[in-house]
Image: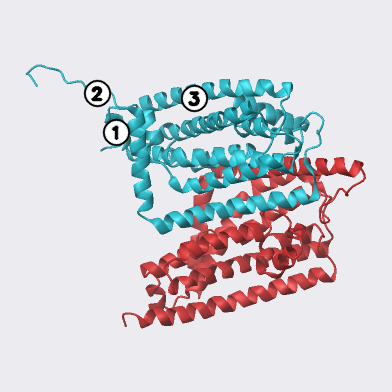
């Protein structure tokens, strides 16, 4: 146990050093990732300006599903934070590849927990990556601060933090479960593509999910993908508040628990199937 | 062949060479039909998602932008024409140039550019066109279908015959501007080595071209609009052909159409210059 903690600490330190060496390039790269938000600022500005014309003519209000123009921009920035926590690049494909290449075998012989190991690696990676990315993120948020109406109350902030941590857990175990499909089929990449497509649309990266018309909004708000980006952002902006907020957190927690179990079950079933081949 | 006679390599027929490139790429793409189909379907999927977003937006507003009198606002079908144009330009680039630009960086890095340099054909032609990505035809078709859907539904306006004839020309010009930027970025691998930030830079800059230039207003917006029209002319790429087809002629915008031709020529010339400089600086790895 101590040995494992020491190994993890060393991996963390090496990743940190590596990341810091190229930090200049990394900071510029991270700042550039906010450039699409600039286009969103102008795009939604044009949308709301167009609505303003209608409003002057007596039709419509200055809001879309409860989001004003400034709320929209703030939403995109917050969705980026959610995505920072919940995106797991290469996790599912990595697991599938390790299954396909037989690397899984070493985890079956040694007393090392495959999923646990991957989890710790992700935590290390995220800590390092976003520890160093904190500077460009802070710069970007400072530049866009005019779109926020100040900090939410402390309990909302706490709920926001909790939802972010849970979005990390959800993102990890959801993608890990998908990766486990590699035990049953070789065509994981096509499945992953479809998942990525729906993920991008239905996790709230493109727009706040509640602007979808019925019945699509009910569908979108019933599936767990919303907790990867939409829910934390909506919590911060107090678009989800009161009992709905605590309910949402509880449901998010339930989904996390579900996928932890699903991942475990898939792993054990998969390993049993895998070991059945070749004796 | 008599002794002492110099044999000159005949000049290649560039059209025939290109057709061979196209055919070879098609054969290669068709060797993995499932892959081809999956790639086509997933790219259509992305386009469909984006389209759904804009349909959603137009449920809440009738116009993008407020400047309806000066022709600055885009209504739903005009914007669809814009989207379709964007699809066409981007997929022409994707089909003919994108895979080649990535390959070019690799050729520089691995030193295999030597083999391209040895061939008796213009190097820029060779490395720019040798691979054709046929799976992009799916989105080209989607773009054309969207165009066919939106143009008849334009509110009280039909494009003139001249506009229809000029449209494909300007789509091509737009693609050539994108190509020039791409080649310049790829050529910098000679000096900067493999640099992921450059590809990201490409994506972010071209992201600005995906929307009508009128949305960029206000102090920062005006500055952006000026820079991206006159310094790095990405805003003429989709705006000029889309406006040709979607909106009635307005003298204020005529200069932009003329400028687009100038900008394309300048971009191509600049890219050619950078390319030649890159070749001069190129030191091959061992081969």
* Quarter the N terminus of chain B occupies: top left
Q: Considering only order in the chain, which callout, 2 or 1, is on the residue closer to the N terminus?
A: 2
* Label 3–label 2 contact, CB within 8 A: no
Residue under circle 3?
B268
Position of residue A7 in the picture relative to residue A226 (left or right): left
Which chain's colour is red? A
Badge 2 marks a residue whose secondary structure is loop
Q: Position of residue A71 (x, y in %)?
A: 80, 51
Which chain's colour is cyan? B
**What is the chain identity of the residue bearing mark 3?**
B
> In the rendered view, would you say B74 is above or below B138?
above
Residue under circle 2?
B10
Residue under circle 1?
B114
- Indicate which label's residue lies in the foreground, 1 or 3: 3
Within the image, what quadrant is residue A82 found in? bottom right
Q: Residue furthest right?
A: A58
Q: Considering only order in the chain, which callout, 2 or 3, is on the residue closer to the N terminus?
A: 2
The residue lying at 68 percent from left, 26 percent from top is B226
Q: Residues within 10 Å of mark 3 (few under 14, many from 20)?
A: some
- Indicate which label's residue lies in the foreground, 1 or 2: 2
């Amino acid at each position: 146990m101590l040995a494992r903690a020491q190994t993890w600490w060393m991996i963390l330190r090496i990743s940190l050093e590596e990341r810091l060496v190229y930090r200049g390039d990394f900071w510029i790269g991270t700042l550039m990732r906010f450039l699409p938000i600039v286009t969103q600022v102008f795009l939604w500005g044009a949308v709301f300006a167009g609505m303003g014309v209608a409003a002057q003519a007596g039709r419509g209000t200055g809001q879309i599903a409860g989001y004003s123009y400034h709320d929209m921009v703030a939403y995109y920035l917050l969705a980026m934070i959610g995505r920072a926590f919940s995106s797991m690049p290469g996790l599912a494909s990595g697991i599938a590849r390790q299954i396909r290449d037989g690397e899984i075998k070493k985890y079956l012989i040694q007393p090392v927990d495959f999923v646990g190991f991957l989890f710790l690696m992700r935590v290390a990676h995220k800590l390092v990556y976003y520890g160093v990315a904190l500077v460009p993120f802070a710069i970007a948020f400072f530049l866009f601060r005019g779109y926020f109406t100040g900090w939410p109350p402390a309990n909302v902030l706490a709920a926001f933090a909790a939802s972010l941590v849970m979005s990390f857990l959800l993102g990890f175990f959801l993608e890990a479960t998908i990766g486990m499909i590699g035990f049953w089929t070789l065509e994981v990449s096509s499945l992953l593509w479809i998942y990525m497509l729906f993920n991008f649309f239905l996790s709230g990266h493109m727009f706040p999910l509640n602007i979808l018309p019925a019945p699509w909004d009910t569908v979108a708000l019933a599936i767990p993908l919303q907790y990867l980006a939409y829910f934390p952002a909506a919590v911060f902006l107090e678009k989800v508040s009161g009992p709905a907020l605590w309910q949402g957190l509880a449901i998010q927690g339930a989904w996390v628990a579900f996928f932890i179990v699903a991942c475990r079950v898939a792993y054990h079933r998969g390993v049993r199937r895998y070991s059945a081949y070749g004796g | 062949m008599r002794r002492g006679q110099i044999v000159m390599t005949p000049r290649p027929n560039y059209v025939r060479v290109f057709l061979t490139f196209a055919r070879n790429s098609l054969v290669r793409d068709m060797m993995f039909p499932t892959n081809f189909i999956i790639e086509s379907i997933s790219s259509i999927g992305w386009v469909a998602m984006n389209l759904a977003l804009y349909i959603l937006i137009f449920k809440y507003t009738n116009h993008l932008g407020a400047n309806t009198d000066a022709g600055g606002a885009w209504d739903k079908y005009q914007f669809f024409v814009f989207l379709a144009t964007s699809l066409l330009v981007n997929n022409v680039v994707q089909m003919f140039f994108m895979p080649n630009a990535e390959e070019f960086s690799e050729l520089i890095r691995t030193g295999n550019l030597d083999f391209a340099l040895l061939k008796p054909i213009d190097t820029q032609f060779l490395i720019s066109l040798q691979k054709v990505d046929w799976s992009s035809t799916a989105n080209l078709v989607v773009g054309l279908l969207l165009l066919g859907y939106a143009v008849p539904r334009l509110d009280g306006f039909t494009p003139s015959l001249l506009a229809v004839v000029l449209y494909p020309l300007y789509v091509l010009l737009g693609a050539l501007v994108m190509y020039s930027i791409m080649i310049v970025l790829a050529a910098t691998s000679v000096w900067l080595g493999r640099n992921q930030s450059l590809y990201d830079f490409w994506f972010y800059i071209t992201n600005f071209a995906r929307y009508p230039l009128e949305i960029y207003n206000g102090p920062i917006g005006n500055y952006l609009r000026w820079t991206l029209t006159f310094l790095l002319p990405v805003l003429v790429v989709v705006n000029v052909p889309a406006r040709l087809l979607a909106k009635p002629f307005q003298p204020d915008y005529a200069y932009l159409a003329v400028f687009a031709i100038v900008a394309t020529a300048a971009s191509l010339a600049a890219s050619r210059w950078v390319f030649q400089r890159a070749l001069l600086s190129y030191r091959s790895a061992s081969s």
